[in-house]
Amino acid sequence: SQQGEEDPQALSIQEGENATMNCSYKTSINNLQWYRQNSGRGLVHLILIRSNEREKHSGRLRVTLDTSKKSSSLLITASRAADTASYFCAAMEYGNKLVFGAGTILRVKS
Amino acid sequence: DTAVSQTPKYLVTQMGNDKSIKCEQNLGHDTMYWYKQDSKKFLKIMFSYNNKELIINETVPNRFSPKSPDKAHLNLHINSLELGDSAVYFCASSRRTDYEQYFGPGTRLTVT
């Protein structure tokens, strides 16, 4: 079952701007994770937020989680050209199966 | 000092053949996974092993058989390859089943 739906599908911004990506999921979760995938590469874990947390920061990343709306958002501040990649949310269902969304393609123009 | 490695990186083969993809992790993790990423970048779990025991087995054709000889290795064997098996296959590992996962670089399988 596909759990996470992401919005937008693609995002193009100028270097220095902020990028916001949204994710929705369908069932109860243990945690929600965000990953980055550069073209032709494997996924890299960015941040994990547990179901009892509402917000988490890591460097230029800020993640929020709203379990009542079954949604999460990833904010990348002061974007750089190197942030150009696909970003995936992944919902950890009870039973510990990680279900990925379709991803958001972010392009940061320098 | 690659954390999760996969071989081969590319695999081109004909329909009907049998092939294997190997995965090794040197992170000391207990859990390993196989994912399939299709042409639309949709990533779906196929199998998960914890301490060499199969814990997740999604609806995958039985032509796909994972084998875990030890905690550091999880191989994927595919029999009678079909065109629809063409995809990128990722191996991953995690310290615990509910923790973040570390992915390998992927194996691009093309079936002609």
Image (cartoon, rainbow, N blue to C red):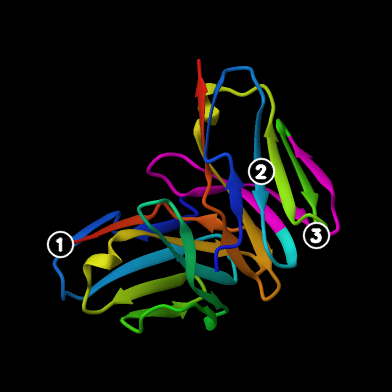
Q: Nearer the viewer, residue A85 or A66?
A: A66
Q: Nearer the viewer, residue A37 or B21?
A: A37
Quadrant in the picture for residue A13: top right
**Residue receiving disc 2:** A22
Question: CA separation, marks 2 and 3?
Answer: 16 Å
Q: On the rendered structure, is B42 left or right of A31?
A: left
Image quadrant containing the N terminus of chain A: bottom right
Q: Are marks 3 and 1 on the same chain?
A: no
Q: Residue at x 65, y 60 (%)?
A: A91
Percent coordinates x, y for residue A31 in the rendering = 73, 60
- Which stretch did the figure color magenta? A32-58
- Predominant SS of the magenta segment: strand
Residue at 70% x, 34% y: name it.
Answer: A75
Q: For residue B38: magenta?
A: no
Q: Which kind of residue does numbered mark 1 sit on?
A: Thr
Q: Chain of mark 2?
A: A
- Asked if disc 1 and disc 2 are in contact, CB closer than 8 Å, the reply is no
Please tell me which of labels 2 and 3 falls first in the chain. Answer: 2
Q: Nearer the viewer, mark 1 or mark 2?
A: 2
The x, y position of residue B74, in whole percent, is 43, 72
Which residue does the image show at 86% across and 58% down from the upper left? A52
In the image, taking residue A29 as reference, residue A45 lies left or right, namely left
Amino acid on which disc 2 is placed = Asn
Q: Nearer the viewer, residue A57 or B29?
A: A57
Q: Nearer the viewer, mark 2 or mark 3?
A: 2
The residue labelled by disc 3 is A51
**Above or below for B57 versus A76:** below
Q: Quadrant of residue A28?
A: bottom right
Disc 3/disc 1 C-alpha distance (Å): 44 Å
* Rendered residue at 47%/58% (across/down): B43
Which numbered disc covers residue B112? 1
